[in-house]
Amino acid sequence: MNNTMKKLILVLVAVGYIIHVNAQNDYNEERNIVAISGALTSCYTWQLEVSYHYKVCSYIRIGASMGMWKQYVADGYPTGKEWRVSDDDEEVENFYIRPSLQLVSPPIIHFSEGNLAFLLEPGCMMNIPYNKVNIAVLNEYGMITNYKKISSNKGRWYAFDYKIGFSLDLGSAGISGGYMYSNLDIFAMNRRMKYNGKAFDEFYPRPQKIHGGFLSLYYYF
């Protein structure tokens, strides 16, 4: 067994011991955490999710969330001669599941009714790997005469992200907020679509990293 493997085993044993000790110390504490969270991002999207995490020890929680994101401003949409994407489909949206790990620091500030700590939450957003849009067919006067549906199941449907900020515990409830970052491409499912030989990708901005802010309300039980 080489030295690197020995060091890795020692680290895993040490982490396991710390978790075990904290679990014994926190035996009488509430271990279940439910939350509702919202976010606004630099890609003109809002996010809303509900989550559940299990408190492994004082500083580590594992769980997942379910939610939805949607554009509130259309940043480009496909259109062509005698057709365009319908009004309802100009802003892209999707539903997702997001497994995540929450790492909470020891309290940095104590209050009479609670404490403030640092929060780091890496996660993986898994969107529904499918999308469809309605195409409005126009006549020579620009009036809608028909609708056609097109769909796609191609494109990257997952993204990695993290949230970093502060967590304010107030007894059995609390609030957290801060900065979020993601490599999600909100147009990923639409980029592969085509209509009348026009690829939708040319109408959307290049993939970009997402920055934003989040706010969560949570409850222990």
Image: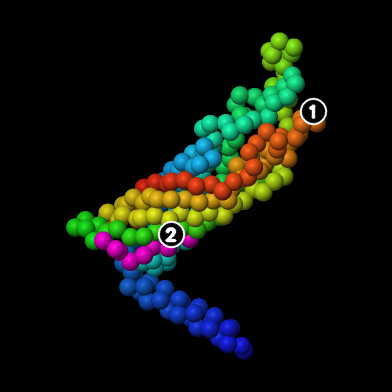
Q: Earlier in the sequence, mark 2 or mark 1?
A: 2
Our reading of the magenta stretch's main secondary structure is: strand
Label ID, residue 120:
2
153 shown above or below 134: below
Q: Which residue is mark 1?
A: 196
Name the residue located 64 percent from the left edge and 42 percent from the top edge.
206
Residue 49 - label:
none
Q: Quadrant of the C terminus?
A: bottom left
Relative depth, front residue between 119 and 99: 119
Measured Cα–Cα span from mark 2 to mark 1: 46 Å
Q: Is residue 155 left or right of residue 107?
A: right
Q: Amino acid at mark 1?
A: Asn
> Was residue 134 drawn as part of the magenta stretch in this picture?
no
Viewer-proximal residue, 41 or 136?
41
Over which residues does the magenta segment extend?
100-109
Identify which residue, 173 or 121, lies in the foreground. Answer: 121
Residue 62 seen in render: yes
